[in-house]
Amino acid sequence: MNDHHATSKGDRVGALSRVTVIHTLGPSGTNLEKAAHHWLAERGVAGKVVLHAEVEDGLDAMAFDSTEAILACAVYPRLHDLVFQNLHRLEMADSFILDTHDMVLAGRPDHTAVSTIVSHPAPSSLVAERGEVTLTSSNSRAAALCAAGRYDACVTTGPAAAAEGLRLIENFGPVPMIFTLHVGRTLGDGARTGAGGTSAC
């Protein structure tokens, strides 16, 4: 690592102390919503969590003044795009490990056959051999689509399944997950772009 471009621990702590609004994936019941509230609570911050249909939708709603951030996770399929397409206005400033909600396969109480399943892309491999899998934007959205009768079953979180009145078919349990916090800031806040200014693993 080039020490000239390294961010000191003190700089990171200072930047994180200003974050009071977190934008992340909704609707309510997602693992990202849980993680966002956890991050604020751990710091004793009476902040706000704003939920969006897609993680990237937060980019259109947030302020880039170091007080707002986007929360994503390590298995988010487009995490690399979120990072590298927004180097000029987002900085990955923190990460932490937290168990997800219980991940479950759930269906409607009045419907026992399972041939079509809806899932967010990340956990879809849990049911790859169980039926025809259709992908959607979030675990909570999957539960809503199943409850509406569009699919026989869904991969979702325990809270989202309960909120939609779905029956439990299988509980896969919680998953230890890495969550990543991306703070919005302007180029004047110490952005490191240009030749030699960024690096990738």
Image (spheres, rainbow, N blue to C red):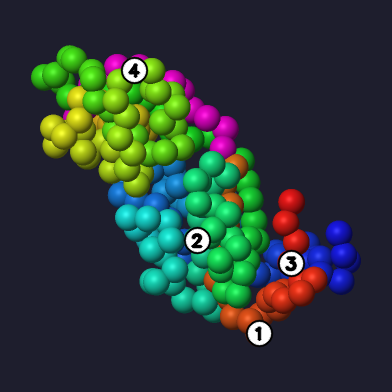
Q: Earlier in the sequence, mark 3 or mark 1?
A: 1
Left or right of 24? Residue 86 is: right
Q: Main secondary structure of the magenta part?
A: strand
Position of residue 37 measured from the top left corner of the image (x, y, whole percent)? 46, 51
Nearer to us of marks 4 and 1 is: 4
Q: Are marks 2 and 1 in contact (CB under 8 Å)?
A: no
Mark 3 in CB contact with mark 2 (< 8 angstroms): no
Residue 167 magenta-highlighted: yes
Are dots 3 and 4 in contact, CB under 8 Å?
no
Residue on which the image places disc 4: 130
From the viewer's perspective, tell me whether residue 164 is left or right of residue 172: left
What amino acid is labelled 2 in the image?
Answer: Ile
Discs 3/2, front: 3
Give the number of the disc on residue 70. Answer: 2
Residue at image location 33% in from the left, 23% down from the top: 105
Mark 2 or 4, closer to the camera: 4
Mark closest to the chain's N terminus, 4 or 1 = 4
Q: Residue furthest left?
A: 110
> Mark 3 falls on what kind of element?
loop
Name the residue type under label 3.
Thr
- Residue 17 visible from this viewpoint: no
Residue carrying label 1 = 188
Q: Earlier in the sequence, mark 2 or mark 1?
A: 2
What range of the chain is rendered magenta? Answer: 164-177
Give the distance between the C-alpha atoms of the residues marked 3 and 1, in whole angstroms.
16 Å
> What's the residue at 46%, 37% (across, down)?
122
